[in-house]
Amino acid sequence: MKIPDLYLFSGLGADERAFSGLDLSGYSIRYMSWIKPEDQEKISSYATRMAREMISDNPVLIGLSFGGMVAMEVAKQIPGAIVILISSAKTKREIPPYFRGYLNRFLLRLLPGRLLVWPNAVTFWLFGVTTQEEKKLLAAILKDTDPDFLKWALSQILQWKNDVPAGQVYHIHGKRDRLLPYRYIDRPVPVHNGGHLMIVSHAGIVSDIIREILAQEHRVD
């Protein structure tokens, strides 16, 4: 069977640096670049535009955090798509209810975008990064994030309406994720001691799980 093409969707405004620790050698990889959202655009419309950039008829969508939610919406446009979520959510029910209230939407509109991308001790704690190398990487990603895109993405997370997972979905989730707590996630593949940025801190474990999934789906080594 043909080895699948992997399409990687990073988290919020991040880029492919978030995936730098993964070992996906042997696969064709395309990092999906975020496009500028249109005025008042919903995540479903945004995903439709992202899907137009995909040229494979045998894709595996790998989505990190917000990128996983976009991948879920893209999968609705591609029959038979396989989706691998990392530190993400399959449906709105997996997003903690305290994030989805009207008060949070109101506060998000008031907060300056630059404040949201300022690395600090609270950010490091929420993402579960502990080493200087991890903090340096997260800080660099945040500093390069477009504040306007970040505010739009956060608003879409708070308003996400998805009720049913699309495609064949696998979900890898850290048991110590503080942003999207493990207790809200339905039947994930657990990573013990993994935080929200376990794709960096536990890259070897996440790589092994992804390879096992791909081997199971496509019978490749």
Image: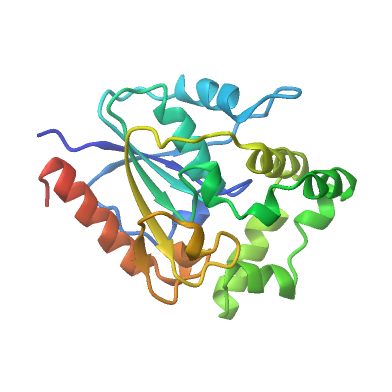
Report the quarter where the N terminus lies.
top left
Q: Residue furthest bottom?
A: 131
Identified at 64% across, 68% down, the residue is 126
Identified at 35% across, 56% down, the residue is 187
Left or right: residue 90 versus residue 42 is left
Closest to the observer, 45 or 9: 45
Depicted 185 relative to depicted 139: above or below: above
State how many labels appear: 0
Identified at 67% across, 37% down, the residue is 159
Identified at 51% across, 55% down, the residue is 17
Query: Which percent across, then down, holds residue 2?
Result: 14, 33
Query: Which percent across, then down, holds residue 11?
Result: 56, 49
Q: By what rule are the colours in the image chosen?
A: rainbow
**In the picture, residue 217 is in which quadrant?**
top left
Query: Which percent across, then down, holds residue 166?
Result: 38, 33
Left or right: residue 221 versus residue 210 is left
**In the picture, residue 81 is in which quadrant?**
top left
Left or right: residue 154 versus residue 73 is right
Query: Which percent across, then down, holds residue 164?
Result: 43, 35
Closest to the observer, 12 or 181: 181
